[in-house]
Amino acid sequence: MFSCEFVTFISALACSIAKGKSQKEINILAAFFTQLGDTLATISTLDSD
């Protein structure tokens, strides 16, 4: 998948996930996915040694 297609996919996915959710629910989901991404990056960094 090309980078622009990936960005478009992620944006569409975010819109789909957010649809019908309250601001609080969206904030919780954003925090969840941010922590998930950061944890995966940490694991990847530690496992690359």
Image (cartoon, rainbow, N blue to C red):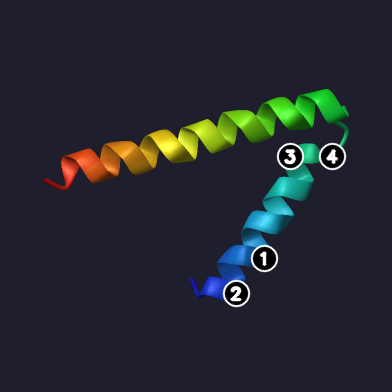
Q: Secondary structure at mark 1?
A: helix
Residue 17, numbered circle: 3
Discs 2, 4 touching: Cβ within 8 Å: no
Q: CA distance from mark 1 to mark 4?
A: 17 Å
| Residue drawn at the location 25% of the way across and 45% of the way down | 45
In the rendered structure, which amino acid carries the disc numbered 2?
A: Cys
Q: Residue 35: x and y, percent?
A: 51, 32
For the image shown, how many numbered marks are present on the structure? Answer: 4
Name the residue carrying label 4. 19
Discs 2, 3 touching: Cβ within 8 Å: no
Q: Earlier in the sequence, mark 2 or mark 3?
A: 2
Viewed as shown, does residue 28 lie left or right of 7? right
Q: Secondary structure at mark 4?
A: loop
Q: Residue 46: x and y, percent?
A: 21, 39
Q: Earlier in the sequence, mark 3 or mark 1?
A: 1
Above or below residue 8? Residue 32 is: above
Residue 8, numbered circle: 1
In the rendered structure, which amino acid carries the disc numbered 1?
A: Thr
Give the residue at the far left of this rendering.
Answer: 49
| Residue drawn at the location 64% of the way across and 60% of the way down | 9
Name the residue carrying label 2. 4
Discs 1, 2 touching: Cβ within 8 Å: yes
Q: CA distance from mark 2 to mark 4?
A: 23 Å
